[in-house]
Image (cartoon, rainbow, N blue to C red):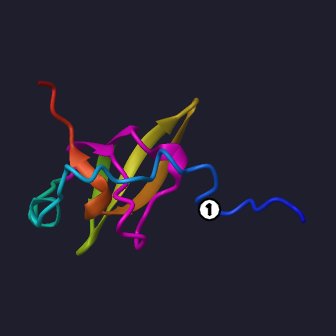
Amino acid sequence: MPRSKGYRRKTRSLLTKDSKVSSGLSSIIREYKVNDRVVIKINPSIAKGMPHRRYHGKIGIIEKVFRRALLVNIKDGGKTKKIIARMEHVNPLNYN
């Protein structure tokens, strides 16, 4: 049987949620503005609006704010990619 090459392939450890950490409404309610720096952190319990796994942990700059999603510019190699991700999969960048 041929191997599957699906969208969530090889994500067993990447897309598993820690049972001790709970995500509330604060990730959805948070206000984002253009030119804010954010980190793509995929929430595996929500499949809708999930960016590709290669962008997990990447830092980007918000280009546009939609009603439920964000358009984020990410540098990948020598190119700039535009990623559309819902707010559940994005966290603000903290330098602490």
> How many neighbours does mark 1 have within 10 angstroms: few (below 14), some (14-19), or many (20 or more)?
few
Q: Nearer the viewer, residue 39 or 12?
A: 12
Give above or below for 81 relative to 57.
Answer: below
Q: Position of residue 64 (x, y in %)?
A: 29, 60
Using residue 41 as the reference point, say whether residue 26 is left or right of it. Answer: left
Q: Position of residue 44 (x, y in %)?
A: 39, 60
Using residue 27 as the reference point, say whether residue 6 is left or right of it. Answer: right
In terms of secondary structure, where does tag 1 sit? loop
Residue that mark 1 sits on: 7
Q: Which of the 4 image quarters holds residue 66?
A: bottom left
Q: Amino acid at mark 1?
A: Tyr
Q: Name the magenta segment's main secondary structure.
A: loop
Which residue is located at x 16 percent, y 54 percent? 33
Which stretch appears magenta? 34-60
Q: Nearer the viewer, residue 14 or 69?
A: 14
For the C terminus, give its image quadrant: top left
Q: Which of the 4 image quarters holds residue 46?
A: bottom left
